[in-house]
Amino acid sequence: MHLHAGEFDEASTLIEESDTITALTGNAFIGYSSPGVARVPRRRRRRSEVSAQQATARGEGRAAGGAHYWLAVMHNSLGQYQEALASAERGCEHEDLALFGSSLIELIEAAARANAPQAAAAALQRLEEQAQASGTDRALACWPGPRCLPSDSAAADLLYREAIERLQRCRIAVHLARTHLVYGEWLRSENQRRDAREHLRTAYEMLHRFGAAAFAERARRELLATGESVRPRTVGAWQILTSQEAQIARLAAEGSTNAEIGAELFLSPRTVEWHLHKVFAKLGVTSRNKLRKALPAP
């Protein structure tokens, strides 16, 4: 829920806690959500591929479908629509109650952009059946949004506005930002540049704030295409690290030992050491002594 609400730091903290417990107890890695908060696309791809392989080996369709869903999200964010279509189709092979509907949304966007109208129409029909049966704002908002993508009719504008209005009434902020993005892209294609800029700016600000860097870059490129000047924003160290990693890194940089950090954060020294190794890898440093320079003032 934190992930779909755009609260990536909170989601990362919970996933880190889960991964820590898994590593220290020796249990099997599940990884339902961890690919979704990977800030680097290649890391997200690798996590998703590993999750899909492990889930397939266990015969667990839900986890396999989820892994292919995250791959489809990644490819759509990068504008790699053929690859997104292939991943989304694999994600839709396992019809479960978790991410099947979300995979359909990714499939529709990818198919519409990859010039595969039949695949988009078939997925749209399945999504419509689910959305109408559910009747929630979240479901109904995600239905008309993708419905617009294969369409160039005058009704598309009303459908996009309906989707945005419904999503504003619930916590699915990432989908709201993405709807602003695809609406802005559609408006630009209709030569409505001023209106397009409004929605693309909203999408860019929201997606950058969440930490969804690839989607934010897609919005930035669209803004540039409308004639608006937008500077790419760099991702600082505090955005790369999860909340817990940032706490541990700050305390270590101030000179606290693993035992002292553990006592303050209610973690074992071994867990602190495990987190520090991950911090070193993310920041490209090899020792605690180099942390202070790698960490800017928060």
Image: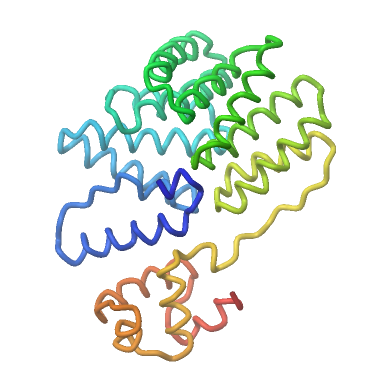
**Depth check, front residue: 69 or 98:** 98
Q: Identify which residue is drawn at 14% across, 61% down.
A: 26
Q: Position of residue 207 (x, y in %)?
A: 60, 46
* Residue 171 location (% of width, % of height): 49, 42
> In the picture provided, is 17 more to the left or to the right than 287?
left
Residue at 42% x, 22% y is 135
Q: Residue at x 53, y 27 (%)?
A: 81
Q: Position of residue 113 (x, y in %)?
A: 58, 21
User: As rendered, which of 60 and 156 lies closer to the eye?
Assistant: 156
Which residue is drawn at the image coordinates 30% and 63% (left, top)?
17
Q: Is 249 situated above or below 166?
A: below
Q: Residue 77: x and y, percent?
A: 55, 38
Task: Place residue 97 in its image quadrant.
Answer: top left
Q: In the rendered view, does 117 fall on the left or right side of 63? A: right
User: How many tags in the picture?
Assistant: 0
Quarter of the image where the C terminus is located: bottom right
Picture layout, residue 119 above or below residue 71: above
Residue 256, by quadrant, is: bottom left
Drawn side of residue 164 relative to residue 250, left or right: right
